[in-house]
Image (cartoon, rainbow, N blue to C red):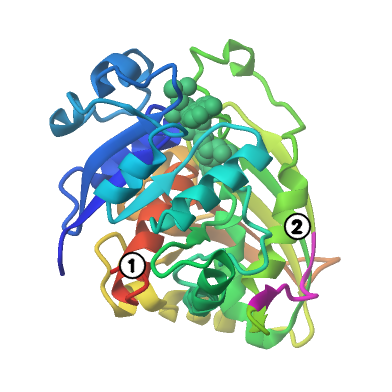
């Protein structure tokens, strides 16, 4: 596999820092460019992000002296010097939409963490183990944009990264209704306990826009490509409550599910144990060996103990049991800034390279 030169747009932010750490020593990707707002542009990466560094691992030494470019003013320069970019910026939705399209039109593929394009019909939203075939919509998007190389691909929201992977492989049983409550870490808001002291010893029962994303995005993942766009599925029927809890990293979901053809508990456990997706089959560098991991113990999985399973790229499941209103209930967990953000995007980029969409 050739080595790709990669840019991180939003490199100084919390997700951008995760990209920096994950891409240090990556076998295919080499970070040559970092970009952020005009506030950071012109400084070295260390000057711009050093004091805000919030990841447990230090800033990669090889990146400390990269000069931060302006994500909005240096687009041509960035697009012409990298093979593709990762994008995770905190801007208004319409500004992000326009920014990502400008990169794509400059023939620079964009692998995005942002929500802005998740419902653009010809932009694939991919969890590589579940719907890698949605990348087939990229030629249609290129036609609309008038590009040869450039396109946008996005990952889904971090909240659903625990429960959708557990449900998706059970689709053949006809999933009808899903009720989910998520217990979400403060890093999902780009915060730490230092920057959000109100969260210590506290629970906040509201995360702006999160419940809508948690109910609506899964339907695009279950969707089908028709006439050059992804048409979202009309089922399962999701309802969600999303709650902010005082943990640093890791989103946990409590799920209730009803099927058309109720499987046995043993069948569900077998499906989870045997499930493998494109990343496992292709042995992509960031793929967890075992994507779905079931824990038999009543008090597991736990956020602090299991969020880092397989480098934070695996999903942990537990407490599967029958319910007196739905068919079953269970809990599930994933790391929100690894699998749910930067790690999920790195895996998606690996998929797009392996499929030949990024050359
Ligand atoms: P963050 O820590 O606030 O970082 C935001 C980044 O955007 C910084 O690099 C910042 O640069 C840059 N930026 C802000 N305004 C800009 C502008 N006008 N022009 C160019 N760059 C600008 O945010 P984050 O938590 O990393 O989140 C970034 C994105 O990822 C958001 O869309 C978020 O919804 C999404 N996301 C986050 C998570 C998570 O778990 N945190 C998960 C999934 C998705 P400066 O440093 O120069 O200001």
* Residue stretch rendered in magenta on the structure: 229-238
Placement of the N terminus among the 4 image quadrants: bottom left
Placement of the C terminus among the 4 image quadrants: bottom left
Residue depicted at x 39% and y 59%: 107
In this view of the protein, can residue 326 be seen by the observer?
yes
Residue depicted at x 50% and y 59%: 152
Q: From the viewer's perspective, tell me whether residue 248 is left or right of residue 175.
A: left
Give the SS element for disc 2. helix
Q: From the viewer's perspective, tell me whether residue 246 is left or right of residue 110.
A: right
Residue depicted at x 29% and y 59%: 286
Vertical arrangement, residue 197 with respect to residue 242, above or below = above
Of the numbered discs in the image, which one, if any, rests on residue 6? Answer: none
Comparing 5 with 188, the one in front is: 5
Snapshot quadrant of residue 62:
top left
Give the SS element for disc 1. loop
Distance from disc 2 to disc 1, alpha carbons, whole Å, reads 31 Å
Q: Is residue 234 magenta?
A: yes
Q: From the viewer's perspective, tell me whether residue 117 is left or right of residue 234.
A: left
The first of marks 2 and 1 along the sequence is 2
Of the numbered discs in the image, which one, if any, rests on residue 358? Answer: 1
- Residue 94 position in % (x across, y down): 67, 41
- Residue 357 position in % (x across, y down): 37, 72
In this view of the protein, can residue 248 be seen by the observer?
no
Q: Is residue 194 magenta?
A: no
Snapshot quadrant of residue 185:
top right
The residue under label 2 is: 215
Comparing 214 with 297, the one in front is: 214
Residue depicted at x 51% and y 80%: 271
């Amino acid at each position: 596999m050739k080595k790709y030169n990669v840019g991180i747009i939003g490199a100084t932010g919390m997700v951008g820092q995760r990209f920096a750490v994950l891409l240090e020593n990556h076998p295919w990707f080499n970070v040559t460019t970092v970009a952020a707002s005009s506030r950071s542009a012109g400084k070295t990466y260390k000057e711009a992000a050093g004091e805000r560094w919030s990841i447990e691992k230090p800033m990669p030494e090889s990146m400390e002296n990269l000069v931060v470019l302006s994500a909005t003013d240096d687009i041509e320069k960035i697009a012409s010097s990298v093979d593709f970019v990762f994008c995770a910026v905190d801007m208004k939705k319409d500004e992000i939409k326009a920014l990502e399209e400008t990169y794509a039109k400059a023939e620079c593929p964009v692998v995005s963490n942002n929500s802005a394009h998740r419902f653009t019909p010809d932009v694939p939203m991919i969890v590589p183990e579940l719907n890698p075939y949605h990348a087939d919509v990229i030629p249609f998007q290129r036609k609309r944009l008038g590009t040869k190389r450039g396109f946008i691909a996005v990952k889904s929201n971090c909240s659903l990264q625990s429960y959708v992977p557990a449900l998706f492989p059970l689709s053949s049983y006809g999933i009808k209704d899903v009720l989910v409550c998520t217990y979400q870490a403060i890093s999902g808001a780009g915060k730490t306990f230092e920057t959000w002291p109100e969260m210590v010893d506290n629970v906040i029962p509201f995360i702006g826009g999160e419940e809508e994303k948690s109910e609506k995005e899964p339907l695009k993942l279950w969707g089908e490509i028709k006439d050059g766009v992804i048409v979202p599925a009309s089922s399962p029927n999701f309802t969600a409550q999303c709650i902010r809890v005082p943990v640093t990293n890791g989103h946990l979901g409590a799920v209730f599910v009803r099927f058309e053809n109720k499987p046995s508990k043993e069948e569900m456990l077998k499906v989870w144990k045997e499930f493998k997706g494109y990343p496992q089959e292709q042995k992509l560098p960031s793929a967890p060996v075992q994507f779905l991991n079931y824990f038999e113990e009543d008090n597991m999985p736990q956020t602090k103990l299991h969020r880092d399973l397989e480098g934070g790229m695996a999903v942990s499941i537990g407490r599967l049991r029958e319910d007196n209103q739905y068919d079953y209930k269970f809990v599930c967990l994933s790391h929100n800034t690894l699998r749910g953000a930067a790690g999920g995007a790195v895996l998606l980029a690996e998929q797009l390279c392996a499929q030949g969409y990024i050359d």
